[in-house]
Image: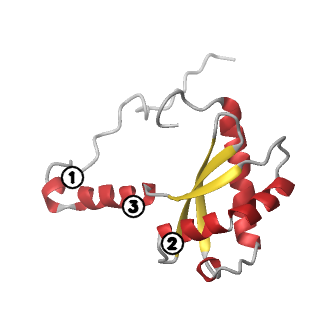
Amino acid sequence: MATGNPPTQRQLRVGEEIRHALVRLLAEENFRDPVLQDISITVSEVRPGRDLKTAKAFVYPLGGRSADEVAAALNRASPFLRGRLGRAVHLKFTPQLSFHADRSYDTASAIDALLTDDRVAKDLPDKPDKPDKLDKPDKPDTADDGA
């Protein structure tokens, strides 16, 4: 939904339901495609279309396989997964699935590498700031009201 309007509440709910169902399917199914055998796949997000008839699933493989290769294999298995998904979720229409490699993990790693770089580390404070007095009171309130 990068362009245009933000997702509706219904889109967010349906996306999460589809994501949970896909995670279960990918963990339980035995695929014929050698790229999808013996691999754990993280489904980080599912973005349904406005009409809920299409959905983009962002996936990331664990264990060193190429994310693009896994996304392509899942797109080949998309009709099979759509059929299984239709039995797992209760929607009027089962959306057409398209799988995309999730780049957010790569971006997070790049940012982490930048923050640990010596040139950047010198600009970061060595110690965290002192906690605010509102966060931690000096003395507990022990007022005795004589009751």
Q: For mark 1, what is the residue?
A: 126
Give neighbour class at mark 1: few <14, some 14-19, many 20+ (Cα, 10 Å).
few
- Mark 3 vs 1, N-terminal side: 3
- Tag 2 residue: 69
Q: Earlier in the sequence, mark 2 or mark 3?
A: 2
> What residue appears at the point 64 percent right and 29 percent down from the top-left corner?
8
Q: Residue type at mark 1?
A: Asp
What secondary structure is found at the residue carrying circle 3?
helix
The residue at the point 81 percent across, 60 percent down is 83
Estimate the spatial distance between the alpha carbons at disc 3 and disc 1, rounded to whole Å.
27 Å
Indicate whether 20 appears above or below 144. Answer: below
The three-letter code of the residue at mark 2 reads Glu
Residue topped by disc 3:
106
Question: Mark 3 or 1, which is nearer the eye?
Answer: 3
**Residue 81, image x and y in percent?**
74, 63
CA gap, disc 2 and disc 3:
16 Å
The crowd level at tag 2 (other Cα within 10 Å; few <14, some 14-19, many 20+) is: some
Nearest to the observer: residue 58 or residue 52 = 52
Mark positioned earlier in the residue sequence (2 or 1): 2
Q: Position of residue 141 (x, y in %)?
A: 52, 26
**Secondary structure under badge 1?**
loop
- Say which residue appears at 67% left-offset and 45% top-offset: 54
Closer to us: 9 or 4: 4
Q: Is residue 20 above or below residue 3?
A: below
Image coordinates for residue 84, horizontal then vertical, percent: 81, 61
Which mark identifies residue 50?
none
User: x and y percent of residue 95 in the render?
Assistant: 73, 48
Numbered disc in front, either 2 or 3: 2
